[in-house]
Image (cartoon, helix red, strand yellow):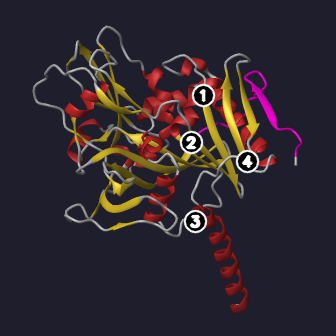
């Protein structure tokens, strides 16, 4: 084990490894859930995002106000923000084998690391950030942390119209739902990722047909993601089945539908005095492989002609044009991974503005990121493999 307890990674030290393309491949939907308003942390699995349903006649919206979430998983379940990811995953697929997974993370963490590699990839300037990391039997968990997980926008404050736009232009599909998250897997840079991200909405099948590209991109997002079908899961029952896992304080309701990845969308709002260029938004869409986008422009809250765009081709183009930075992103993730493994599995990752570098610090005494029963998933799969091998040996 290394005696070092601190590693400093500069931008200049990251050599883009080899000439192999750094592409996201083999994208798969694993699970999803919606947060439900409740005094006890409650999720609906698979849940469902709001449906895109713009008004027939534009009208002026009020500015955002009241409670808004910055990191809803941490706000609603601060004891273990990653727990809903695992609970929804194992409700959806009880036999999921976690051992081949290298990285489990939120989209926000990868966006932050990418913004360090290339500060111009962020719409905002590069800001100080912190990520908690833990390695469990060869899998690195990365937990998002924020100074504030939610905020109250006071009546005298102005922070745009984004939340009011989503309320007016989408329709909530589950009673009491306050946010929808999807968990996907993919292969990137020689690593197997499981990634969680929030979804702003989805387009219905009829709406999808209006924006789908005429030519299928067999190596692009449309080709990769278009095969997932819509399947209903108990959306009409007035009392969906609920459970609370052992060693957990969460309630899990089995309710919602699985929405195809190629129908999911990201919503961005902006004043009509400027344009939102795809290069500003592509990094976020690329990390989560979100293929559809709404760029909505307003004049003092009046939005005109907001529509859904299929940007799968543009995201693929962005990926090809940013290969050097994406290969450096691979190098950065692997450097962090190696450091955390060497220290026994717990660390803090932070961007230090003074040195303009990533600092990885060992935190052996830090609290674990998951309830104890979820760590057994790594052991359970080892025991299952050993039993399978014994059975094969006995029968041969």
Can residue 27 be seen? no
Q: Is label 2 or label 1 in front?
A: 1
> Distance of mark 2 from mark 4, alpha carbons?
35 Å
Residue sticking out furthest to the top: 273
- Is 229 on the left or on the right of 21, as rendered? left
Q: Is label 3 or label 4 in front?
A: 4
- Is 174 on the left or on the right of 261, as rendered? left
At numbered mark 3, what does the secondary structure look like: helix, strand or loop?
helix
On the image, the x and y values in percent for residue 129 come to 60, 28
Q: Earlier in the sequence, mark 1 or mark 4?
A: 1
Residue at 80% x, 34% y: name it.
6
Residue matched to label 3: 373
On the image, the x and y values in percent for residue 340 come to 75, 44
> Distance of mark 2 from mark 3, alpha carbons?
31 Å
Q: What main secondary structure does the magenta stretch of the protein show?
A: loop
Find residue 271 and name its label. none
Residue matched to label 4: 365
- Is 339 on the left or on the right of 87, as rendered? right
Q: Earlier in the sequence, mark 3 or mark 4?
A: 4
At numbered mark 4, what does the secondary structure look like: helix, strand or loop?
loop
Q: Which residues are magenta?
A: 2-24
Can residue 271 be seen? yes
Residue matched to label 1: 129
Q: Quadrant location of residue 394?
A: bottom right
Q: Quadrant location of residue 22?
A: top right
Residue 385 part of the magenta segment: no
> Distance of mark 3 from mark 4, alpha carbons?
20 Å
Confirm or deny contact between disc 2 and disc 3 (CB under 8 A). Answer: no
């Amino acid at each position: 084990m290394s005696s070092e307890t601190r590693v400093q990674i500069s931008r200049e030290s990251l050599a883009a490894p080899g000439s192999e393309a750094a592409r996201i491949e083999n994208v798969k939907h694993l699970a999803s859930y919606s947060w439900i308003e409740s005094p006890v942390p409650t999720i609906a699995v698979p849940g469902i995002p709001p449906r895109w349903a713009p008004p027939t006649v534009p009208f002026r919206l009020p500015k955002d106000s009241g409670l808004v979430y910055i990191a809803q998983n941490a706000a609603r379940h601060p004891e273990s923000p990653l727990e809903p990811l695992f609970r929804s995953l194992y409700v959806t697929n009880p036999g999921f084998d976690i051992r081949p997974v290298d990285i489990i993370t939120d989209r926000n963490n990868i966006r932050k690391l990418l913004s360090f590699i290339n500060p111009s990839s962020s719409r905002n300037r590069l800001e100080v950030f912190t990520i908690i990391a833990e390695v469990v039997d060869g899998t690195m968990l990365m937990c998002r942390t924020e100074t504030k997980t939610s905020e109250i926008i006071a009546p005298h404050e102005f922070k745009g119209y984004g939340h009011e736009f989503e309320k007016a232009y989408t329709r909530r599909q589950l009673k009491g739902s306050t946010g929808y998250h999807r968990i996907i897997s993919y292969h990137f840079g020689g690593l197997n990722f499981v990634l969680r991200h929030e979804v702003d909405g989805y387009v219905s099948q009829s709406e999808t047909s209006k924006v789908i590209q005429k030519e299928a991109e067999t190596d692009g997002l449309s080709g990769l993601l278009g095969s997932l079908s819509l399947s209903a899961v108990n959306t009409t029952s007035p009392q969906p089945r609920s459970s609370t896992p052992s060693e957990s304080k969460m309630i899990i309701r089995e309710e919602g539908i699985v929405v195809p990845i190629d129908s999911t969308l990201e919503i961005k709002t902006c004043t009509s005095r400027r344009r939102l260029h795809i290069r500003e938004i592509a990094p976020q869409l690329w990390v989560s492989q979100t293929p559809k986008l709404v760029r909505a422009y307003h004049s003092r809250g009046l939005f005109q002609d907001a529509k859904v765009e299929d940007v799968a081709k543009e995201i693929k183009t962005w990926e090809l044009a940013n290969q050097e930075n994406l290969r450096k992103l691979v190098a950065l993730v692997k450097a962090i991974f190696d450091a955390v493994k060497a220290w026994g599995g717990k660390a803090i990752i932070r961007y230090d503005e003074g040195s303009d570098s990533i600092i990885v610090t060992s935190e052996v005494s830090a609290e674990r990121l998951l309830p104890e029963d979820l760590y057994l998933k790594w052991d359970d799969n080892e025991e299952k493999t050993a039993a399978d091998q014994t059975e094969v040996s006995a029968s041969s």
